[in-house]
Image: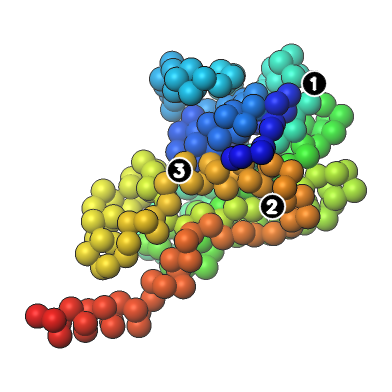
Amino acid sequence: MVGVDLGGKTALITGGTKGIGLASAFALAEAGAQVFLTYKWGSADREEVARDFEARGVLPPRFYEADAADEQDTVRLMEELSAAAQKIDIFISNVSFALRTLSLEDYKKRSLFKTLEYSTWPLIDYARRIKERFGSYPKYILAISSDGPDHFYPGYDFVAASKALLEFFSRYLSVHLLAEGSRVNVLRFGTVNTDSFRAIFGEDFFEYMARQGVPRATILTPEECGKAVLAMCSGLLDAVNGQIISVDYGLPFRDNAMGRYLSERSSDQKT
């Protein structure tokens, strides 16, 4: 982003080796930040990610194997980070995990709690532990959410619940941490073409959307999400705090039953 200089700044991104997390890391690193990326054991090809950073000519990332839902991993992570940096300027809470729930019989309390441990609690736990270890909260705390709380998606029940609670706590954190100089916001991304999205909803989803007349230009790429993350951490939007910001090209407004009906009727009339 033109005019954004994050030289000397540090950014911690959970789940930062794939998808939106990785794209955010690229965007922040290209602005000059040193990025620290966490990943769960066996989920990342560190050498491939490092090569991608090298090809962009930016500071190489530092990798930390840490399960966001494991308290011992979190404690160890903070210790390792304190050996590499004097402070954490940016924290991106990006990890999300949940079991699919295709019917009410799939609802299990243990599964719900596990979902919250991964997708909601790290926002609070990491922020507090950063303060304990470094003496201050990050200037920018950003939670990555989706439009799941406002829409029905098959099998997405627990994810949507965890995102709704994530957004709730983000707004409360924005009040609690305002006096600390922090800005806490949520980016609620719409449809993003990532491996995880295709794993949940199927490989042919985007072909279906094209048949429905939805322009491909309205489907987000991870790179576009990364730019939105950079914008929130750029210093240009410091008046924005405690907000849930939709980044979706306005597709939910356009993609409705009436629009589909009129599009189908127009096609029928042409034939």
Which image quarter: residue 266?
Answer: bottom left
**Badge count:** 3
Which amino acid is tagged 3? Answer: Pro
Q: Quadrant of the N terminus?
A: top right
Q: Is residue 204 above or below residue 10?
A: below
Q: Residues within 10 Å of mark 2 (few under 14, many from 20)?
A: many
In the displayed structure, does residue 258 sit left or right of residue 10?
Answer: left
Q: Secondary structure at mark 1?
A: loop
Q: Is residue 75 above or below residue 222?
A: above
Q: How is the image coloured?
A: rainbow
Q: Secondary structure at mark 3?
A: helix
Which amino acid is tagged 2? Answer: Asn
In the displayed structure, does residue 211 sit left or right of residue 138?
Answer: left
Q: Quadrant of the C terminus?
A: bottom left
Viewer-nearest of discs 1 and 3:
3
Q: Which is nearer the N-term, disc 2 or disc 1?
A: 1
Q: Residue at 38%, 76% (x, y): give it.
A: 256
| Residue labelled with disc 1 | 86
Which image quarter: residue 257?
Answer: bottom left
| Residue labelled with disc 2 | 185
Q: Residue at 60%, 53% (x, y): give it.
A: 187
Q: Is residue 177 above or below residue 31?
A: below
Residue at the far right in the pictured view: 179
Q: Residues within 10 Å of mark 1 (few under 14, many from 20)?
A: few
Q: Which is nearer the N-term, disc 1 or disc 3?
A: 1
| Residue labelled with disc 3 | 222
In the displayed structure, does residue 212 sit left or right of residue 91?
Answer: left
Which image quarter: residue 252?
Answer: bottom left
> Where residue 181 sits: x, y (%)?
85, 44
Q: Residue at 78%, 39% (x, y): give it.
A: 139
> Where residue 92 sits: x, y (%)?
63, 39
Q: Is residue 254 above or below residue 134?
A: below
